Amino acid sequence: ETTALMEAAIFAEDISVVIGKGRDRKALLSHVSIAIPENSFVSVIGASGCGKSTLIRTLREFTGLLGRVLLAGHPVEILRNQLPLAVGYLPQFGAFHDDLTVAEILDFAVALRLPPIGAKTTREQWRQHVIDL
């Protein structure tokens, strides 16, 4: 476990997602553990309703669920709070209008994810850095 934890870009241990209460309680994920090494290309494949989207959302937004999720060795909930643009994912089909430019989509993402207090120059530098990448 220690080696997997240290070498993994994404490390999830014993994560479970349960919804409902009492007799209506249902496990969407049950004790899932994964370690994805740096520089890996990973596909999450399965039948409709098997938990693919739940797994991806849990890895990205892990908050108060059972288990732990680390991205590059850092708890994802801390990254989401301290570096809101550091954690994200792109679904199979983007949720953007076809007539927007890359710069307009990035401006939209910044407006949604960063507090409005941030300096305009910082936002512009971030956008240009992402475009350059």
Image (spheres, helix red, strand yellow):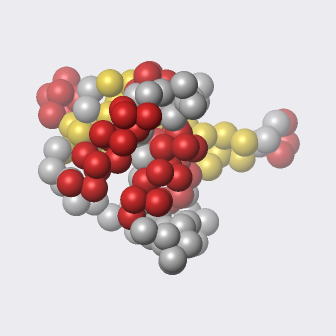
Relative to 14, is 107 above or below? below
Relative to the observer, which residue lies in front, 33 or 130?
130
Q: Identify the residue at the far front of this view.
A: 121
> Residue 6 at x, y = what percent?
18, 27
Q: In which quarter of the image is residue 131?
A: bottom left
Rendered view: 115 above or below 127: above
Q: Residue drawn 57% across and 31% down?
A: 116
Judge by depth and name the residue closer to the eye, 118 or 76: 118
The percent coordinates of residue 126 (x first, y second) are 33, 41
Q: What residue is shown at x 42% (from left), y 46% (from top)?
A: 88
52 horizontally vs 39: left or right? right
Residue at position x 35%, y 47% in the image: 127
- Answer with left or right where residue 62 lies relative to residue 3: right
Q: Which residue is drawn at 59% across and 25% down?
A: 64
Image x and y of residue 30, in percent = 54, 43
Comparing 72 with 100, the one in front is: 100
Q: In this view, does 71 lie above or below 100?
A: above
Regarding residue 46, the answer to whether it shows in the image is: no
Classify the position of the N terminus by image quarter: top left
